[in-house]
């Protein structure tokens, strides 16, 4: 339990010091879309 709390604190500190992402004109998926199933409505 103590190790999990220590890791949570480390992750929080890392997130706080991380740089923000650059702005983009349009959304870009983080996962590849090729080979994925397409569901029609």
Image: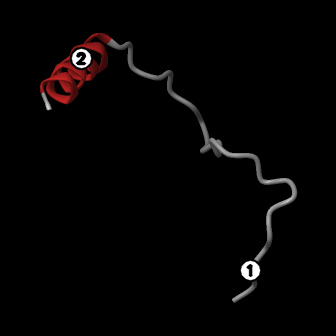
Image x and y of residue 30, in percent: 63, 41
Image x and y of residue 15, in percent: 29, 20
Residue placed at 46% from the left, 23% from the top? 21
Examine the rendered structure and indicate whether residue 12 appears above or below residue 28.
above
- Placement of the C terminus among the 4 image quadrants: bottom right
Q: CA distance from mark 2 to mark 1?
A: 38 Å
Q: How many marks?
A: 2
Q: Mark 2 near mark 1, Cβ–Cβ under 8 Å?
A: no
Q: Is residue 28 left or right of residue 4?
A: right
Disc 1 crowd rating (10 Å Cα; few below 14, some 14-19, many 20+) is: few
Q: Quadrant of residue 12?
A: top left
Residue placed at 65% from the left, 46% from the top? 29
Image x and y of residue 26, in percent: 61, 42
Residue placed at 24% from the left, 17% from the top? 16
Disc 2 crowd rating (10 Å Cα; few below 14, some 14-19, many 20+) is: few
- Placement of the N terminus among the 4 image quadrants: top left
Examine the rendered structure and indicate whether residue 34 appears above or below residue 37.
above
Q: Secondary structure at mark 2?
A: helix
Residue placed at 24% from the left, 16% from the top? 10
Q: Secondary structure at mark 1?
A: loop
Q: Earlier in the sequence, mark 2 or mark 1?
A: 2
Pick whichever, 4 or 33, lies toward us.
4
Label 2 sits on residue: 16
Q: Is residue 35 left or right of residue 17?
A: right
Pick whichever, 26 or 17, lies toward us.
17
Q: Is residue 41 left or right of residue 9?
A: right
Label 1 sits on residue: 39
Q: Quadrant of residue 35?
A: bottom right
């Amino acid at each position: 339990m103590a190790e999990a709390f220590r890791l949570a604190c480390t992750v929080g500190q890392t997130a706080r010091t991380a740089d923000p992402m650059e702005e983009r004109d349009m959304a870009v998926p983080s996962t590849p879309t090729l080979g994925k199933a397409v569901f029609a409505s």
